[in-house]
Amino acid sequence: MLFQVGGQGTRPTFFEMAAAQQLPSSLRAALTYSLGVFALRRPFVHKILDYEDEFFALLMLVLETHSLRTTDASFAESLYGLRRRGVKIRLKKSTVLADSGDEIQHAGLRKRQKVLSVVFLVVLPYLRSKLQSIYNKEREATLQASLWGDSDESFDTDFVGGGNNTLGSRDNLDNEASAGARWIKRLRKTVGACYPWLHAGNEGLSFAYQLCYLLDATGFYSLGLHALGIHVCRATGQELMDTSSRISKIRSRERERLRGSPWLKALQGGLLSCAYAVLDYAQTGLIAAVFFFKMMEWWYQSAEERMSAPTVYPPPPPPPPPKVAKEGIPLPPDKTVCPLCLQKRTNPSVMAVSGFVFCYTCIFKYANQYKRCPVTLMPATVDQIRRLFHDV
């Protein structure tokens, strides 16, 4: 299962390298989400989520080791048809006056490069994840101590003051525990102080290498590849065919190494066949799982948004207009005339309780004297008069 992103030549494009680098994080997010959903019905799955870093590191160790052994590429790089090649640089000097050039030759990965590739692909991300979790906990503890004070010191003081006999009988045990606690606390403070600088330096170097790779200033996409002396190249059709034949040869040699009775060999051969089948379909299955769970996440998220969204009802119809009272002042036929002075309105103002418009001075005097609307005779005060800045 290969994804071709485009480009010409053996040098991968920046987008191919970026996609291959971001695939493990997407895979981890999908697996974590799927296990979280499954844990809602099976509580024992929470034990796996408690050791999420170790579980994912073990999974990637198996996948990366198998991929580097069979295809000379990482798990993500093999999905995009990429291969890792060792770099050999030879200096060429033609004459004294001529410029010296470098000739870069690619070779297969040595065993040392494969082992170090596993370290850079699995061990270092695992350590980075653990340092990130320690830093987050230390930052939360520091913030809580700044807000509420350090509760551990007060607890220790109260315990020492109230139980001298108990502490006297357990001096050695308490000294060892306190020494271990001090060492762990010192380690956490060191991580909390140094990790931001290490993280910033790592991100800065990664950005610099990626920018240089994008501008075609270097052939190394990351500092790890540069340290190992490895270029990532596109695999040719012949290399893909050779990879299949090499996998079959490796598996045939492993079957020949089986020792024991016939039934034991048959059992070991069956287990090897199952392991080979799982590894062969691991790439396709995991990528399909990523797309499937991302789709399910989008589906349930959109459903939850529809359920949590407030119901929009149509606006209610306006109330019926107030009726003119029999004893009230009749309305003039011209709507621009004030019902009180029967002149064209000046400084139009509306009586809020009824909605009829008058001159401001007319309605102010009438409401101040009679405490009602002159048309509908509804109770009103001068506080319910509203000025209008646009009249008919």
Image (spheres, rainbow, N blue to C red):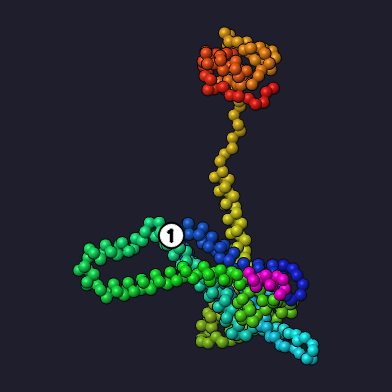
Q: Secondary structure at mark 1?
A: helix
211 in magenta: yes
In this picture, is 330 found above or below 268?
above
Identified at 57% across, 8% down, the residue is 327
Q: Report the side of 368 relative to 358 (left or right).
A: left
Q: Quadrant of the C terminus?
A: top right
Task: Say which quarter of the image contains residue 283.
Answer: bottom right
Q: Residue furthest left?
A: 165
Q: Main secondary structure of the magenta part?
A: helix
In this picture, is 318 found above or below 330?
below
Q: Quadrant of the N terminus?
A: bottom right
Q: Report the side of 384 relative to 188 (left or right).
A: right
* Residue holding disc 1: 143
Q: Is residue 66 visible?
A: no
Question: Mark 1 is on which residue type?
Answer: Leu
Q: Is residue 198 visible?
A: yes
349 or 33, which lies in front? 349
Q: Residue furthest top?
A: 327
